[in-house]
Image (tube, rainbow, N blue to C red):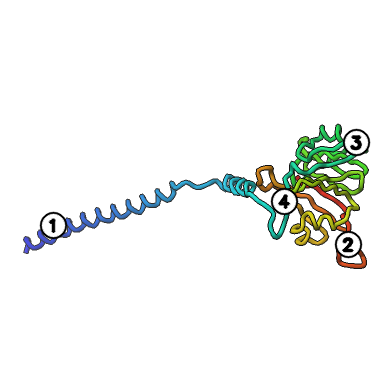
Amino acid sequence: MKKIIIIFTTFCLILGVFLLKANTNGFNFLFTSTAKINNAPVMNPVAKAITSKASKKRFKVDDDTYSNYICADSVFLYGGPGFLKITDITSATALTAFGTPSSTRTEFSEVDDANVLIYDYPAAELSFLNGELINVDVTDEGFSFEFVLPDGKRWLVTPGSEAFDLHNNFTSSYENGSGHNVHLFLKTPSGFKTDGDIVFGLLLDINSDISNTIHTLTLRM
């Protein structure tokens, strides 16, 4: 009887050691797997957003059935005694080209979280952030935009210009305009989309649904 008890006790001890070793290895496997998962590289949310935004900005574009694009270097702003390519306009060059504004003021921009310098001319308002042009609102014939079209022809447009020419030159944008506004998007010389556009504000003929006159022009850089 004692012999049987000794054999049974020994068996239980061996079985217990075996099970303990198996369980220990199992838990190590789980811990190892968890560690590998936890140590996997995770992109910082801010870095991910910046990467996504940069990728979007580098998207190469061309005219399509919904909108037209024009190279920013092919657009000029005329006003006062001179003119400038829109990509060359700064708070300093504007004074030389367009003359002294009627007034200047500074306004806080919640979007940019900074003060914006504004030049008020009789026919336009130019806005600058840290000296760089961010916006132009043309409301009268004293200022105008000139576009160098893909075929090399030039189109000068100012408030009061016929919308018929806008339709002919940028048909996709015109036919897919938003309300009374037609958006012409800007791209880089190498063909990549920018965040900028030019908005043509149309004036409707009260006797029809046809927009026959360009009322305002807004450049957003």
Query: Could you say where residue 81 lies in the image, as x and y percent from the top left?
Result: 90, 36
- Seen at 8% across and 63% down, the residue is 4
Quarter of the view holding residue 118: top right
Query: Could you say where residue 3 lies in the image, as x and y percent from the top left?
Result: 6, 61
Q: Secondary structure at mark 4?
A: strand
Q: Is residue 123 visible?
A: yes
Q: Which residue is mark 1?
A: 10
Q: Please state which of the two labelled residues, at mark 3 or mark 2, is closer to the viewer.
A: 3
- Seen at 91% across and 38% down, the residue is 80
Residue toward you, 167 or 41: 167
First of labels 3, 2 by sequence position: 3
Q: Please state which of the two labelled residues, at mark 4 or mark 1, is closer to the viewer.
A: 4
Identify the mark at residue 69; answer none if there is no mark. Answer: 4
Identify the mark at residue 23; answer none if there is no mark. Answer: none
First of labels 4, 2 by sequence position: 4
First of labels 4, 3 by sequence position: 4
- Name which residue type carries label 1: Thr
Quadrant for the N terminus, please: bottom left
Q: Which residue is mark 2?
A: 204
